[in-house]
Amino acid sequence: MSKPAIGFIGLGLMGSAMCNRLLDLGYPLTVIANRSRENIDKLVKRGASEAHTARELAAASDIVMLCVDTSASVEARMSGPDGVTAGVRRDAIVIDFGTSLPASTKEIGKKLEQAGAFYLDAPLGRTPSHALEGNLNIMCAGDPGAFNRVESVLKDLGENVFHLGVLGTGHTVKLINNFYAQTVANAMAEAFAMADKTGVDRQKVYDVMAAGPLHSGMMDFIKAYAIDGNPDMLAFSVKNARKDIGYYAAMAENLGVESLMITGARQALGMAITKGRGDTLVPEQVDFFSALFREPGKTSG
């Protein structure tokens, strides 16, 4: 059977890796430029077609995939006379792989339904290297029939593919996941910096913590930089982490509750951005905490 034609919007580290995986598997692929030409030129050289508007891309695609940074970016690509919604085929399926606000996702879903198409939210877990191998975690939600139609495609991209419920549930679970991840990551970064402050070797702290129930993949991601000097085990920027934490807080506020545990991670990530560290990777928060502990007035109280 022929493979469905896919249009892909968002050619950052993760999106480019996913597109290369799709090309490896023989999917017809249409892409569109955003901030730079480098990634799109590489994909076109490999056989992808280039569209000049999101509307043109949607008109050429059975499945439209987005992997962009914010809900605002998704909304911008979806709306307007040159947006996806204007060009989407009837019965086509649009999938948002990014981390978006559930409320925004539901509104876009309504508009696509009016256009005769389907919307799925399918945020991702793991890294671009997993994307190249087809080993992502994919947290999909939306119409079950639409999910069944694209499940085989999602399984070409992901090792673990979940269908979690109604539209917006994937983004809800992703925000909870990332809230927990960033709380743990920043706590571990501070732990290594505190070890430095007390004069205890980082490796000894890690050995003790990793020997017990605290051991986790996130701990190992931070350790990979703090001890081994490799930040790329968690190739996720501080500014994107802060965005996700903010979305989690907004979701909680919309539900009429306030998160208590979010405060530390939100403050740490926000301070790091203020200090010009927004483009650094989350494991490099170890350096942020180390520098913070060296500042006058930051060692006590």
Image (cartoon, helix red, strand yellow):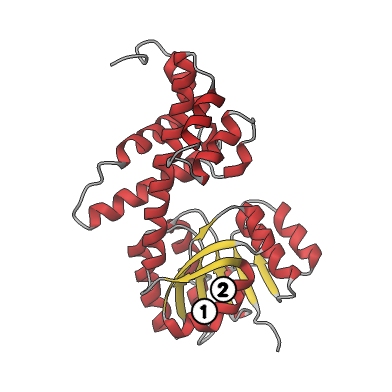
Q: Quadrant of the N terminus?
A: bottom right
Find numbered disc 1 in the image and state the secondary structure of the residue it sits on: strand
Q: Nearer the viewer, residue 206 or 154?
A: 206
Looking at numbered disc 1 in the image, what kind of residue is underneath it?
Answer: Ile
Q: Quadrant of residue 160?
A: bottom right
Disc 2/disc 1 C-alpha distance (Å)? 6 Å
Looking at numbered disc 2 in the image, what kind of residue is underneath it?
Answer: Val
Instruction: Give x and y (percent) for residue 234.
Output: 57, 44
**Residue 64, numbered circle:** 2
According to the picture, the residue beneath numbered tag 1 turns out to be 93
Q: Is residue 141 left or right of 217 when viewed as pictured?
A: left
The residue lying furthest to the right in this view is 45
Instruction: Give x and y (percent) for residue 290.
Output: 48, 21
Estimate how packed mark 1 is, as few (under 14), some (14 to 19) or many (20 or more) residues with alpha carbons within 10 Å. Answer: many
Query: Is the residue 39 above or below the residue 146 in the image?
Result: above
Q: Nearer the viewer, residue 68 or 176?
A: 176
Query: Mark 2 vs mark 1: which is more N-terminal?
Result: 2
Estimate how packed mark 2 is, as few (under 14), some (14 to 19) or many (20 or more) residues with alpha carbons within 10 Å. Answer: many
Find numbered disc 2 in the image and state the secondary structure of the residue it sits on: strand
